Image (tube, rainbow, N blue to C red):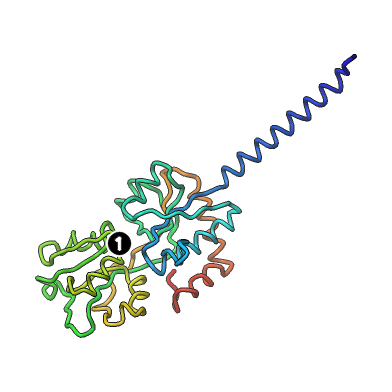
Amino acid sequence: MKINKKLVTALSLTVATLSATAFTSTVAQAADKIRIATEGAWAPFNFIDSSGTPQGFDVDIAKALCEKMKAECEIVTQDWDGLIPALKVKKFDAIVASMSITEERMKQVDFTDPYYSGGLRYLAAKDKEFDTSKAGLKGKVIGAQRATVAGLYLEDNLADVVTIKLYDNNDAVYLDLQAGRLDGALSDELPTYNWLKSDAGKNFEFKGEAFAKDDKIGIAVRKGDKLRGKLNKALNKILNDGTYDKINAKYFPFSIY
């Protein structure tokens, strides 16, 4: 049987082209899949619902950014202390977990532009006097989440004045506050605002005014990762087309941007 060399060549070229196209498509899909981590214990910004699914402001923002980037995203959870170490070893690609942009963290990761701002505020039982001045806090037991701006503030400024108790997550802070094991707590104002509206927080209130209100919250990525630029472009889009405002209104009656 004679072989048509021209036909074989044409078929070979076609197969090669199809293979190359399939390979390119696979690579593109892989490149567009982004794993985003959140904590899952910082309501209303990130929490786990009754079905075990991550929810909250951070999660909604992450999904909106992925939609603008036309990227396939997976939301995963990670304990707070392990977020940056796990990001650095490529367990995931970005952290959207209400993480404050600090000089210490910027030595390890890059941050996007801020996607909201916050401040710190004390809280304690409604029926107790609670002077938030340095002199007024002397001798008190104050709780905060470990490795947060609140926890670091206590360690840096009040270690010689109060007894500091640090916890793995804010839920544990609230539980000890309810149990009377803490005189008060220091936390980010916005998630605390949410807790005070719940049944668990109904007997507690803010004490004093918010401070450290220049606290900027950003999305963390690995050093030098081009994903940072893509996320910033997507953030700009949701800020300008009303998407951000809709997400904001879902959780707060005032702008947190």
Local SS, label 1: loop
x and y, in percent, of residue 66 in the image: 55, 56
Position above or below: 127 against 151: below
**Residue count near mark 1 (Cα–Cα under 10 Å), binned few <14, some 14–19, many ≥20:** many
Q: Which residue is mark 1?
A: 169
Amino acid type of the residue that numbered disc 1 sits on in the rendered structure: Asn
User: Position of 56 compared to 194: left or right?
Assistant: right
Query: In the visual, does 245 lie left or right of 21?
Result: left
Which residue corresponds to the image point at 27% horizontal and 56% vertical from the top-left? 147
Instruction: Residue at the far right: name it.
Output: 2
The picture quadrant where one finds residue 29 is: top right
In the rendered image, the quadrant that contains the C terminus is bottom left
Name the residue rendered at 20%, 63% in the picture: 154
Position of residue 235 relative to residue 245, above or below, is above
Furthest-bottom residue in this view:
127
Q: Quadrant of residue 43?
A: bottom left
In this orientation, which residue lies closer to the viewer: 65 or 212?
65
Q: Identify the image quadrant of the N terminus.
A: top right
The relative height of residue 149 versus residue 131 in the rendered view (above or below) is: above
Taking the spot 47% from the left edge, 64% from the top edge, the residue there is: 51
Residue 52's x, y, as percent? Answer: 45, 61
x and y, in percent, of residue 243 in the image: 56, 68
Instruction: Between residue 5 and residue 216, name the one nearer to us.
Output: 5
Q: Is residue 227 above or below residue 26?
A: below
Residue 195 place in picture, x, y as percent: 34, 74
Compared across the picture, whether 183 is left or right of 41 comes to left
Outermost residue to the top: 1
